[in-house]
């Protein structure tokens, strides 16, 4: 069922500029293009989504309902299956399924309609998973969840397993048996990696630690989605913020190589292996990369990873960048491209060049647009802004109610519970701060 106003009507009302790229490669037709979107919902917790009535969750759902994406990546949604191992929270349904049922499927305004996402995936994340290593070099290995020092020694920073999780929601069928995750890929196995080894810096890895340390601060995932006659690979991740790491730039280097892993995978690099042991990247496939990359073009802290691997990489349609009136109103250099209140362009939806892109935008209305209260919802939902792109894929429209997933989907690759190093969950999402990261930081 379609929304009561068209997406372009909404854009006009909200004052949100949709940029056409002129890169359309599919044949024009009567079908509406497929909308892909990414949204960092800033530390949305289990207790907020497992029942209705939470202000932040409702605001996030309202923003999503305005755009009605067909495929949506959510960053910073707690993986409750992992969290339930150390916290008194339900493990089922997954928080992705609960968010759909309690918020997205329920109209958040009288002039909006609910959206049902029959397919959800919540992969296990490295955030808050104990590494068994003294990663912050303070002389102690902290394996007791609940505080920052535990988070600093986790594979990805998080005070408990599953914090800052990742989810993929789809109105189209997902090929679940072909999902690939790269949570356990070792940083040292990337050729020409930037892994810090200098003991003269405050954050570095010894040779023994490097043999165990994972590159992905949350997880990297490839979710094949059937859209009409095509299979499009949704590539998602949430690299660590390139800050809170001292002189050695540990997190900046990790962020750089996490982004590089996505680009290398899309390019078919053969050194990559997934969590099942399968080798190699994509093979001439169509894809859309989505997520909060914690890196902006020209960002020195991430060693200019966004420019090198997104903007100057002909494997992605990155420009022209989407803009927003709300960002432009900040009247700062490049603020029209910002995707977060803390003043940076960090969230991306990047199709492969064979797919192209019709339009793209950042949902950030100006303060002058107040009639429908959208700006209030945007501010309440997150310090990030939803970014969407229309991709001209020929399709049959998504079914209103295709077979629904079980609501408890993960990557199917949980660490053995008897393995003390990782029993806290294969599921954690943010970055390891390797020394001093605030989980609620604006840079998450």
Image (cartoon, rainbow, N blue to C red):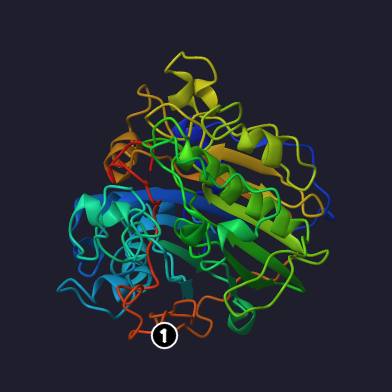
Q: Along the line of sight, which residue is nearer the eye, 260 or 363?
A: 260
| Residue 173: quarter of image | bottom right
On the image, the x and y values in percent for residue 404 come to 47, 83
- Give the residue displayed 49% in from the left and 65% down from the top: 212
Occupied quadrant, residue 128: bottom left
Does residue 174 appear in the picture of this structure?
yes
Q: Is residue 419 left or right of residue 217?
A: left
Q: Residue at (38%, 27%) from the top-left corner?
A: 369
Q: Is residue 369 left or right of residue 253?
A: left
User: Is residue 360 positioned above or below 239 on the image?
Assistant: above
Answer whether residue 391 is visible to the viewer in this image.
Answer: no
Mark 1: secondary structure: loop
Residue at image point 60% right, 47% down: 257
Quadrant in which residue 262 is drawn: bottom right
Of residues 62 and 405, the one nearer the viewer is: 405
Q: Quick check: 75 above or below 85?
A: above
Number of numbered discs visible in the structure rendering: 1
Q: Circle 1: is it few (<14), some (14-19), or many (20+) Cα within 10 Å? A: some
- In depth, the one of 403 and 174 nearer the eye is 174
**Residue 199 place in picture, x, y as percent:** 45, 41
- Residue drawn at point x = 40 percent, y = 72 percent: 426
The answer to whether residue 34 is left or right of residue 149 is right
Q: Position of residue 244 (x, y in %)?
A: 36, 36
Which residue was labeled with disc 1?
Answer: 406
Q: In front here: 379 or 10? A: 379
Vertical placement of 391 versus 369: above or below?
below
Q: Position of residue 265 (x, y in %)?
A: 70, 59
- In the displayed structure, would residue 267 be above or below residue 403? above
Instruction: Tell me the quadrant of the picture where the C terminus can be found.
Output: top left
């Amino acid at each position: 069922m379609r929304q009561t106003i068209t997406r372009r009507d909404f854009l006009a009302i909200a004052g949100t500029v949709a940029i056409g790229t002129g890169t359309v490669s599919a044949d024009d037709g009567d079908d509406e293009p497929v909308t892909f979107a990414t949204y960092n919902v800033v530390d949305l917790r289990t207790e907020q989504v497992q029942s209705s009535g939470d202000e932040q969750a409702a605001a996030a759902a309202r923003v999503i309902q305005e755009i009605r994406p067909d495929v949506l990546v959510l960053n910073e949604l707690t993986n409750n299956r992992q969290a339930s191992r150390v916290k008194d929270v339900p493990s089922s349904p997954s928080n992705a399924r609960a968010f759909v049922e309690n918020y997205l499927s329920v109209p958040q305004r009288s002039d909006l309609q609910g959206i049902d996402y029959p397919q959800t995936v919540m992969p296990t994340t490295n955030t808050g998973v104990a590494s068994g290593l003294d990663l912050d070099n303070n002389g102690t290995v902290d394996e007791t969840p609940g505080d920052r020092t535990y988070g600093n020694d986790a594979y990805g920073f998080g005070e408990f397993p599953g914090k800052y999780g990742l989810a993929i929601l789809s109105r189209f069928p997902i090929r679940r048996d072909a999902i690939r995750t790269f949570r356990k890929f070792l940083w040292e196995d990337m050729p020409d990696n930037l892994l810090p080894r200098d003991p003269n810096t405050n954050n570095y890895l010894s040779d023994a630690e490097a043999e165990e340390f994972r590159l992905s601060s949350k997880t990297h995932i490839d979710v094949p989605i059937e859209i009409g006659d095509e299979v499009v690979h949704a590539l998602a991740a949430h690299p660590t913020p390139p800050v809170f790491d001292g002189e050695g730039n540990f997190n900046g280097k990790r962020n750089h190589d996490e982004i590089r892993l996505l680009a290398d995978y899309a390019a078919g690099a053969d050194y990559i292996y997934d969590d099942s042991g399968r080798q190699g990247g994509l093979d001439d496939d169509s894809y859309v990369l989505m997520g909060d990359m914690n890196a902006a073009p020209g960002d020195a802290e991430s060693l200019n990873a966004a420019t090198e691997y997104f903007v100057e990489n002909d494997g992605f349609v990155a420009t022209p960048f989407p803009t927003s009136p709300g960002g432009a109103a900040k009247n700062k250099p490049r603020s029209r491209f910002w995707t977060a209140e803390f003043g940076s362009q960090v969230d991306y939806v990047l199709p492969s060049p064979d797919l192209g892109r019709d339009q793209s935008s950042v949902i950030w209305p100006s303060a002058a647009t107040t009639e429908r209260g959208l700006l209030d919802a945007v501010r309440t939902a997150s310090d990030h802004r939803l970014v969407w792109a229309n991709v001209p894929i020929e399709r049959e429209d998504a079914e209103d109610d295709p077979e629904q997933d079980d609501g408890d989907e993960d990557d199917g690759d949980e660490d053995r519970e008897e393995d003390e190093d990782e029993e806290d969950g294969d599921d954690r999402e943010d970055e390891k701060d390797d020394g001093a990261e605030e989980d609620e930081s604006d840079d998450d």
